[in-house]
Image (cartoon, rainbow, N blue to C red):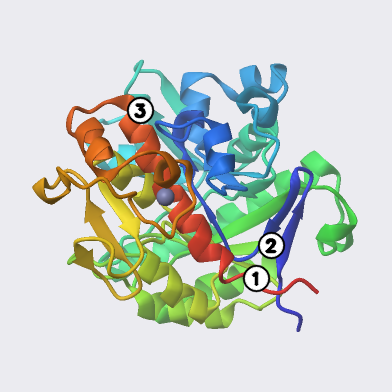
């Protein structure tokens, strides 16, 4: 079986493996999409529910879709909205918040409106947004969820995946045979999410049931980090082996450069995570080994706010060719971040995204 090396989309190819930064609310915080391009970013993730809550997907459809609205003509992946719904449902004790087999209902914390999200409406919203990769609605599982909860979530995830695919096939008027040849049309891709928490038997059941329905890619669902903060790599290894190599293996929310390199070896080929952008705003910069002040296995972290950089006029990382490393000193960026100056957040974010782009670029699967 040929190992998949790229994802063909209407807005260009995604070379694998790839890291996608999160454009929550339709923006990569602190930078422009042009900055992202210059930092080596080729594809982004945006969050369906946030766009639906704040603008409405019908508005985005009217204005010409997410690509036109953002001014980003490269691939965009949308999530199902499920993860945010479940986070909202489990936070606070709002009686109207419910997860049922037919879908979920919750109170929008921003305006008190009741929002319903079903497998079908999630597909419809993503269709209105016009993203290149769509995700089916699933019920996320915590790693330490009890057996009964895990079983129910797996069962619901399968049923919702079936309904999501039916809706997708209806929207694009596709037969199973046409769906099975994704490169012969410019239809968007459809990914399903494997659940099961720490229970490997349930992970297997979840994957097999989803694979029987048939999708373009399979995502690592639920949490990827244990309660003590360690990476749950044994679950990743188990799942990556089950998913065929001609399918996309998307490790959602992974992770640190070390976790990404471990996952790559296991076979995962698509990643997204808030770490490079969020940490940048707190002054934590990813740099090559020996450059920063805290060493990890394959990289080090520079805490730029530290006193030790006060008189340091060197670039952040002399081996990096990003705008930040070409134009400002450690001492100046330290100052900007310490006073919470937006241009400092921008420069730090550009550098961290370049570090992630460079990390993945070294791992490209040769195109055949
Ligand atoms: Zn740099």
Give above or below for 227 relative to 29.
below
Q: Given contact means CB atoms under 8 Å apart, are the residues at marks 3 and 1 in contact?
A: no
Q: Which quadrant holds the N terminus?
A: bottom right
The residue wearing badge 3 is 343
Residue 141 horizontal side relative to residue 292, left or right: right
Q: Given contact means CB atoms under 8 Å apart, are the residues at marks 1 and 2 in contact?
A: yes
Instruction: Say which label, 3 or 2, has the lower sequence index.
Output: 2
Q: Count how many numbered circles sit on residues in the image.
A: 3
* Residue at (41% x, 39% y) in the render: 327
The residue wearing badge 1 is 211
Element carrying mark 3: helix
Residue 128 picture quarter: top right
Element carrying mark 1: helix
Label 3 CA crowd tier, 10 Å (few <14, some 14–19, many 20+): some
- The reply to whether residue 25 is visible in this rendering is yes
Q: Which quadrant holds the C terminus?
A: bottom right
The residue wearing badge 2 is 215
Q: Find the distance from the CA under tag 3 to the CA under tag 2.
A: 42 Å
Is residue 282 or residue 57 the one in the foreground?
282
Give percent across and percent down for residue 75: 67, 44
Q: Which mark is residue 92?
A: none
Give percent across and percent down for residue 328: 35, 39
Is residue 350 or residue 152 the one in the foreground?
350
- The extreme left residue here reads 307
* Residue at (26% x, 71% y) in the render: 296
Give above or below for 108 relative to 299.
above
- From the image, state whether disc 3 or disc 1 is nearer to you: 3
Q: Find the distance from the CA under tag 3 to the CA under tag 1.
A: 46 Å
């Amino acid at each position: 079986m040929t190992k998949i090396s790229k994802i063909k989309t209407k807005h260009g190819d995604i070379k694998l493996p790839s890291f996608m930064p999160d454009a929550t609310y339709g923006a990569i915080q602190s930078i422009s999409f042009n900055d992202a391009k210059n930092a080596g970013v080729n594809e982004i993730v945006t969050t369906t529910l946030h766009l639906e809550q704040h603008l409405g997907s019908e508005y985005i459809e009217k204005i010409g879709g997410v690509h036109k609205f953002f001014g980003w003509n490269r691939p965009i992946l949308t999530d199902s909205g499920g993860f945010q719904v479940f986070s909202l449902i489990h936070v606070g004790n709002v009686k109207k918040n419910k997860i049922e087999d037919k879908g979920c209902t919750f109170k929008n914390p921003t305006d008190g409106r009741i929002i319903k999200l079903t497998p079908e409406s999630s597909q419809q919203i993503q269709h209105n947004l016009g993203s290149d990769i769509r995700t089916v609605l699933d019920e996320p599982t915590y790693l330490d969820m009890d057996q009964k909860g895990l079983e129910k979530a797996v069962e619901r995830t399968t049923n919702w995946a079936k309904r999501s695919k039916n809706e997708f096939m209806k929207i694009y008027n596709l037969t199973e045979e046409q769906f099975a040849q994704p490169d012969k049309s410019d239809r968007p891709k459809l990914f399903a999410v494997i659940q099961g928490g720490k229970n490997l038997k349930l992970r297997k059941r979840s994957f097999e049931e989803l694979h029987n329905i048939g999708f373009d890619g399979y995502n690592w669902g639920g949490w990827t980090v244990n309660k003590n903060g360690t990476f749950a790599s044994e679950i990743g290894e188990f799942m990556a082996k089950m998913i065929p190599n001609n399918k996309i293996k998307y490790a959602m929310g992974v992770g640190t450069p070390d976790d990404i390199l471990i996952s790559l070896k296991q076979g995962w080929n698509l990643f997204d995570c808030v770490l490079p952008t969020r940490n940048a705003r707190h002054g934590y910069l990813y740099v090559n080994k020996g450059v920063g002040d805290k060493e990890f296995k394959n990289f080090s972290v520079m805490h730029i706010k530290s006193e030790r950089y006060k008189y340091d006029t060197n670039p952040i990382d002399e081996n990096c060719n990003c705008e930040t490393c070409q134009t400002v000193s450690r001492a100046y960026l330290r100052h900007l971040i310490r006073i919470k100056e937006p241009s400092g957040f921008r420069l730090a974010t550009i550098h961290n995204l370049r570090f992630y782009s460079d990390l993945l670029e070294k791992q490209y699967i040769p195109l055949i």
